[in-house]
Image (spheres, rainbow, N blue to C red):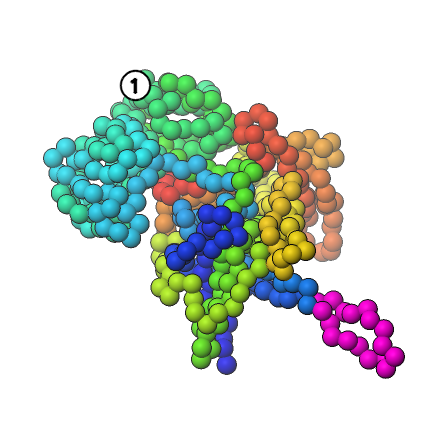
Amino acid sequence: MPSSNRTQVTSVRETTVGTTPGTPRMRLRRVNGETLQLVPTFAASNEMRSDRMASDIIRLGKQSGGDLPYDMIYPFPDSPNDTDICSAFYNDFTNTATRFNDGTADSVITAVATTGEIVTCTTGTAFVAGQLVRLTGFGVSGNNVVAKCTTGSATVPAFVGAGLTDEAAPAAAARMKVVGFQGASGDITATATGLGSTSLNFTTLGLAVGQWIKIGGSATADKFATAALNSTARITAIAATALTLDHRPTGWTTDAGTSKTIKVWVGDQIKNGTTQVGQTIERGFLGQGTPNYFVHPGMVVSNQAYNFALNQPVTVANTYQGMGGSVSTSPLDASPDASLVLASFPPFVTRVHVGRVTEAGTTIATPNFLRGMTIVLNNNSTMIEAIDAEAAQGITGHAVDVTGTAEFYFGNNALLTKYLAGTPTSLASYLYNSLSGQALIFSIPRVIFAGDGSPNASGRNVDVMLPLSWTASKDETVTNAMITLDRFEYVEN
């Protein structure tokens, strides 16, 4: 009998929502289960019969949709997890400069030279002097480093001092991506309002207002001597020699950074928008003698829910609405790309990977520790149906609702007072996985606690909790968004 463990789920992003790409490059997904459906709909006939019998029910059309839950992992660009987030946010990530051979050796990154420590690549967003660039997947092991760009270029950036050596035809997995920036010795300082510099020009580094950063490397020479400064913060203004930051960590102070080559880590960011993203999802039941493959085109995330439960992996639950589908004994792609491997993309879990949670820009700590939280994006989408088509012809995304819950220990009345007064605040959560060096920051920049809010002593020997539900609204001050997500491919803590 077919086992659920032999179910294969693959997907591909669509260029036109509802149209599966020709000869699609399918990618295997890591899932915790699936309740996707491709089902016909029926209605009973109203015909009256003198024999008291019923006429055949009438087939009306077909519907496609359902749920895919999984553990939260780093959403590598163009992976199924990335596409799910883009579909839920109705937007794309704004990515740092990247080059990737993506399975074809010597295609995008075409050479590494010992002389000048230059990497030759096809054109794109330029790499800039002062940026930290992570090189991975190269055939010469010594070329897999995090290197500071010393001469910027779109096609021939140099990394003098990184120890790069000749590689005439970089491997199929060769990749280079901006993951941060670094100042010269003593150049980057901590000011009363953020970061300052003397020679490094912050306006050239591809930074954006509303973007989060992580300050400080792992080596003593690459981080501030004042430990409290080596944490996360959000950019609110960018000038040539000054980064203005809010959500600064508790204990923020000035520091001259004397003799320090301070590293600062940056990532890609997405915020809720208006561009619909669809994908084709295929389910294959491989335990059958002849496997059946269910194809679901035009799958758009109508609801995406994140759950940060104590002592559990952070989970994602996606609910899709789709545009019809079909069943076949042949897959769309007989050799789909492998799923993101566990060793390189481990799940984020609460406690050990939640590095910092803030409310109103301040780290949540004693006595109101956070025990758990949820974040839900609801696109209030509806299927577009026509009398001349048996399947939905499109998906309408209406107004997005961003809501959630948070369970605090009722240590004092600070949060209760905000709830009773309807005072706007903000929430943010920094997740860092030390196994992979990957990090995420979820930020809801404007929140009002709008429900629950009743602490109760429910019995003996029970901690008194303050459960709060919240609703987000547009932040018109910094982000012009209701929710943002920053992903860091590599961070040193």
Q: Is 44 part of what is drawn in magenta?
A: yes
Give the residues drawn in magenta, as a range: 42-58
Please provide percent x and percent y for residue 233: 47, 31
Q: Is residue 27 above or below residue 444?
A: below
Q: Residue at x 31, y 35 (%)?
A: 124
Q: Would you place residue 316 above or below residue 90 in this image?
A: below
User: What percent of the width, then of the height, locates residue 49?
Assistant: 85, 77
Majority secondary structure of magenta residues = loop
Where is residue 61 shown, x and y percent of the image?
65, 63
Residue in the foreground of this view, choosing between 44 and 273 = 44
Q: Which residue is mark 1?
A: 199
Q: Position of residue 109 (x, y in %)?
A: 24, 43
- Image point (64%, 48%), residue name: 381
> What is the three-letter code of the residue carrying label 1?
Ser
205 or 323: which is nearer to us? 323
Q: Is residue 378 above or below residue 215?
A: below
